[in-house]
Image (spheres, helix red, strand yellow):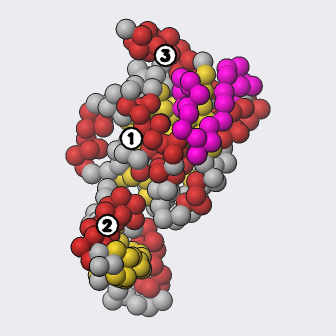
Amino acid sequence: MKVGVVTFPGSNCDYDAYAAIRHVLGEQVDFLWHKSEDLAGSDLIILPGGFSYGDYLRSGAIARFSPIMKKVVEFADSGGLVMGICNGFQVLTESGLLPGALIRNRSLRFSCKYVNLRVENNATSFTNTCSKGEVLRIPIAHGDGNYYNFDGDIETLEKTGRVVFRYVDANGEPTDISNPNGSINNIAGIVNKEGNVLGMMPHPERAVESILGSGDGLKVFESVRAALPALNLVGEK
Amino acid sequence: MTTNKTATVYVRLKDGVLDPQGVTIQKALSQMGYDDFLSVRTGKFFELEVSGSASDIDRKIDEVCSKLLTNPVIETFEVKK
């Protein structure tokens, strides 16, 4: 597997993603500079967390116009796997690769803590090594993670299994108190219609070894590795 | 003919989109004793200076408002020239 991690000015989780892929998963990984227009033959593109362009205007609004994003959109449109984590999720909604928007946390506070995530759909390229309903412990760290979308679009996402992760309590229930930011229906991560683009606010790359507090995040990357051979076969037809 | 024109763009959150800042400000007002302020909605504005032909400028301002200055999922804009 070859992974490309995009570095925007202000990205700060690019090294975490790099380390998770290279040192824990043991796969190839390259940084992709935001001004580049070359995805270096990557099988998976990661848009990492951070504060691209200082979160000026709206989170992710300016990064979306980076030269590399043209290529990322083309890659996604042709079925390539793209994963946006935290600020990367915000870039994906701003660029229209994922529906909805991420607005200010209802608490108005930056929230940095471990949360429980329930896997709502384990039939995606990002969750196939999880079981349905499994609860993962993965940290969040964001100020603008409150997922918003129109009622009709939320209904479509829910009905078509595109809500992949939901914030839940220790018993696996999506309660209001376990919702760290006010997201509609406790939504923490979604995929696009085709299932090849994932956006999630929590940081799986920060939970890849038990010494970090949890190794659950590794499952997301292991799932991509498991999904790739079949996807590549489809591409070669 | 090329002219310079200024415009102000007012950006508002759409009705129904939660505005946590507005809610917090309203609560603060209430705590200060201003119970009669029932609701506060926040927004932002941009002051633009643009050069070009008059018709081009109007078109371009609308274009940048939709493309960059606002996110049409959550915001609306109004241009005052």
Q: Nearer the viewer, mark 2 or mark 1?
A: 2
Tell me whether the residue at label 3 lies in contact with that at label 1, contact meaning CB atoms closer than 8 angstroms.
no
Give the residue at mark 3: A227
Percent x, y for residue A17?
65, 35
Residue drawn at 67 percent across, 48 percent down: A12
Q: Quadrant of residue B36?
A: bottom left
Tell me whether the residue at label 2 lies in contact with that at label 3, contact meaning CB atoms closer than 8 angstroms.
no
Indicate whether A109 appears above or below A174. below
Tell me whether the residue at label 2 lies in contact with that at label 1, contact meaning CB atoms closer than 8 angstroms.
no
Residue drawn at 47 percent across, 36 percent down: A72
Percent x, y for residue A84?
51, 39
Percent x, y for residue A125?
46, 22
Disc number for residue A97: 1
Q: In the rendered structure, does residue A37 fall within the stretch colored magenta?
A: yes
Give the residue at mark 2: B60
| Residue B10 is at least partly visible in this image | no
